[in-house]
């Protein structure tokens, strides 16, 4: 069974509430022995049981459920891999995040800060080398300086200069000095804008991820649209209200990404109303193809609906989702415990997410095994975005749904025999599979234990 953080978090919250296992179990309506198994991470917890325990402990159910700390754990793993000489106890990362969430959050935050500063330095270095605006500005400034220096030398070294020519040389120096000042001011404003820590350089996608996490990946006002037809004006109003109520959205590019995501969410909510969708998913044993047929929807919409809802309030198995374009850029994602999606750099090319681009419109399924022996069922498909246009290449996005292998019983009746697990990694740099033929970067970890 996969290692879960839910039991550890429940145990810590129970101790803080000064409750015994027996007392908590009685108030939550479960047996003490069952709670003991949960707290020792030998049984998963979700649905009504999780909600009952959360009510007794007076904490949000989302703070106890799996997947909430996936990004944090991913950062801790990346931090350990980034500093291998320190010898951090990688095997204890989940326990650290479960028992000491504040310390884990601080370590992850410090690592993210360091990583983002390195990314900023790299971007600035690249800009100094390749930015056309900067190159043109520096060229113009050098031209202004050269003109001023040449004219000054004439005035200094030639004594008998006619008054008319002398006045013209003075005018040249004045005009070139003004141009030099304007160029310098433009350059300063350019760097001030690019160096704004709130604007960032390459992190709007991360800010979208943080926005989704703050809202627990669900938006009830938009879900309510499924109960009755809504006009575009109503959708725009609700989307703008959600954005306005989030005080942490200050970057214009992030706001654009959030707006685009929420508009797609609203469309999915109307095409696949939440109440009907939940009932259909249970009846269809979470078969995305059957669900898509019932709602006359595409598989990407079904994937999004399965992933972007409050999983702590449903009996559905926890799922992760990543959607990427043909260039491999992640468009949006929902993490799942034990399966990290890289924040920077390329993901493992062996994922079905990328395999599906070779067979567009054809579903791909596989069992994946990460180096830590965690197994997952991956479902992926690449679909064309928008109506095809003659003379234009198709715009393809691929989506990959991730489910813990231990949840395969819930998928009974339709999931084909997927054969042996496929060994994969997260990214080449932190993947210990030294013999992998798909490796594109050197690893910074030790080899995988045999």
Image (cartoon, rainbow, N blue to C red):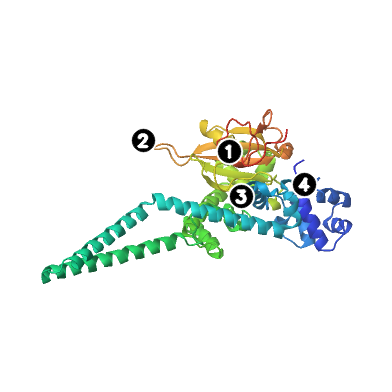
Pick whichever of labels 2 and 1 is earlier in the sequence. Answer: 2
Residue 44 circle label = 4
Which label sits in the foreground, 3 or 1? 1
Q: Earlier in the sequence, mark 4 or mark 3?
A: 4
Q: Secondary structure at mark 1?
A: loop
Question: Label 1 neighbourhood size at 10 Å, few (<14), some (14-19), many (20+)?
Answer: few
Q: Is residue 18 left or right of residue 174?
A: right
Q: Position of residue 286 (x, y in %)?
A: 67, 40
Q: Circles 1 and 4: CB distance less than 8 Å?
A: no
Quarter location, residue 365: top right
Tell me if mark 3 has few (under 14), some (14-19) or many (20+) residues whose alpha carbon lies within 10 angstroms of its own: many
Using the numbered discs, state the Cα–Cα distance from disc 2 to disc 1 in whole angstroms. Answer: 40 Å
Q: Which mark is residue 391?
A: 2
Q: Which residue is mark 3?
A: 308
Q: Residues within 10 Å of mark 4 (few under 14, many from 20)?
A: many
For the residues carrying marks 4 and 3, which lies nearer the camera in this image? 4
Left/right of residue 409 with respect to residue 174 in the rendered view = right
Mark 2 lies on a secondary structure that is loop
Q: Looking at the image, is mark 2 or mark 3 earlier in the sequence?
A: 3
Judged from the image, the secondary structure of the residue bearing numbered disc 3 is loop
Q: Residue at x 74, y 39 (%)?
A: 406
Q: CA distance from mark 4 to mark 3?
A: 21 Å
Q: Which disc is residue 442 wearing?
A: 1
Disc nearer the start of the sequence (3/1): 3
Q: Nearer the viewer, residue 54 or 182?
A: 182
């Amino acid at each position: 069974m996969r290692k879960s953080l839910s039991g550890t978090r429940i145990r810590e919250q129970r101790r803080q509430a000064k409750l015994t296992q027996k007392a908590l179990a009685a108030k939550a309506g479960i047996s003490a022995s069952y709670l003991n198994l949960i707290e020792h991470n030998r049984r998963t917890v979700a649905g009504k049981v999780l909600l009952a325990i959360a009510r007794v402990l007076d904490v949000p159910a989302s703070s106890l459920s799996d997947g909430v700390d996936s990004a944090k754990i991913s950062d801790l793993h990346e931090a350990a891999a980034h500093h291998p000489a320190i010898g951090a106890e990688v095997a204890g990362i989940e326990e650290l995040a479960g028992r000491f969430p504040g310390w884990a959050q601080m370590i992850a935050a410090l690592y993210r800060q360091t990583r983002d500063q390195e990314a900023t330095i790299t971007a600035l270095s690249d800009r100094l080398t390749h930015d056309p605006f900067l190159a043109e500005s520096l060229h113009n400034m050098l031209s202004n300086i050269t003109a001023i220096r040449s004219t000054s030398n004439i005035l200094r070294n030639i004594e008998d200069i006619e008054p008319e020519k002398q006045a013209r040389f003075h005018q040249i120096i004045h005009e070139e000095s003004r141009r030099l000042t304007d160029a310098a001011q433009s350059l300063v404003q350019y760097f001030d804008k690019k160096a704004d820590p709130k604007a960032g350089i390459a992190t709007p996608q991360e800010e979208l991820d943080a926005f989704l996490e703050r809202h627990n990946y669900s938006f009830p006002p938009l879900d309510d649209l499924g109960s009755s037809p809504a006009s575009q004006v109503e959708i725009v109003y609700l989307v703008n209200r959600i954005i306005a109520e989030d005080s942490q959205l200050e970057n214009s590019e992030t706001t654009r990404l959030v707006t685009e995501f929420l508009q797609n969410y609203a469309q999915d909510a109307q095409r696949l109303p939440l109440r009907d969708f939940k009932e259909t998913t249970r009846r269809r044993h979470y078969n995305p193809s059957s669900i898509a047929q019932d709602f006359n929807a595409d598989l990407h919409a079904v994937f999004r609906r399965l992933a972007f809802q409050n999983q702590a309030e449903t009996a559905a198995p926890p799922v992760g989702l990543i959607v990427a374009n043909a260039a491999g850029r992640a468009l949006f994602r929902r993490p799942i415990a034990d399966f990290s999606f890289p924040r920077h750099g390329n993901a493992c090319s062996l994922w079905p997410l990328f395999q599906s681009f070779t067979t567009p419109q054809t579903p791909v399924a596989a069992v994946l095994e990460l180096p830590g022996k965690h197994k997952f069922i991956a479902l992926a498909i690449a679909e064309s975005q928008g109506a095809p246009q003659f003379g234009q290449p198709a715009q393809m996005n691929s989506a990959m749904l991730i489910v813990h292998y231990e949840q395969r019983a819930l998928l009974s009746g339709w999931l084909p025999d997927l054969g042996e697990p496929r060994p994969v990694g997260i990214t080449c740099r932190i993947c210990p599979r030294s013999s992998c033929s798909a490796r594109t970067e050197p690893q910074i970890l030790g080899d995988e234990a045999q």
